[in-house]
Image (spheres, rainbow, N blue to C red):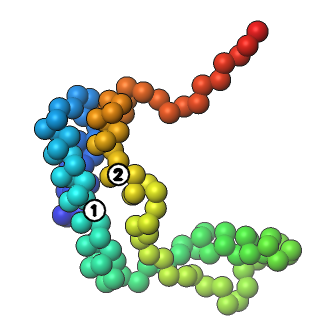
Amino acid sequence: MNLLFALATWHAYAKLRLHTDTTLQFMESATTILGEQLRRFVKVTCEAYNTKETPSEVAARARRQGKQKGNATGPSESSGPKKKELNLSTYKLHALGHYTDTIHRFGTTESYSTQTVRFKIY
């Protein structure tokens, strides 16, 4: 429940359409708390559960391995579900720490686009 609250709080700050220095400070604090809660979740909650790949993930892995070996056969007998863990070392989670600085520099996230623009020259 603590992690869900931290996620909801961070998301609420991220979706504000108007920020002040105070709201950015609160968002920075919420980001710190969210990081702490995510690390605690992995350490405490994830350790208590044995999570494995779904059958579709096992099948997809077997197909990839089959293509790499040159045969498109199904999964071998020994390829059962592998253990899955929450990976905190992803760019998506790393980037959370940069949101407040980005909002401070460029404004809220709905005020600009990261879409590449192509100009057609006549």
Q: Residue furthest top?
A: 122
Residue 43 visible within the image: yes
Relative image position of residue 65 (x, y in whole percent):
74, 75
Q: Residue at x 16, y 45 (%)?
A: 26
Relative vertical location of residue 46 with respect to residue 35 in this rendering, above or below:
below
In the image: residue 52, left or right of residue 44: right
Q: Residue furthest right?
A: 70
Q: Amino acid at mark 1?
A: Gly
Look at the numbered disc 2 and give the secondary structure of its residue. Answer: helix
In the image: residue 86, left or right of residue 54: left
Question: Which quarter of the rendered picture does the N terminus lie within?
Answer: bottom left
Look at the numbered disc 1 and give the secondary structure of its residue. Answer: helix
Q: Amino acid at mark 2?
A: Leu
Q: Residue at x 60, y 25 (%)?
A: 117
Residue 4 visible within the image: no
User: Residue 35 shows which numbered tag?
Assistant: 1
Relative image position of residue 96 (x, y in whole percent):
35, 51
Q: Quadrant of residue 7?
A: bottom left
Q: Quadrant of residue 78?
A: bottom right
N-terminal label among 1 and 2? 1
Relative image position of residue 62 (x, y in whole percent):
70, 75
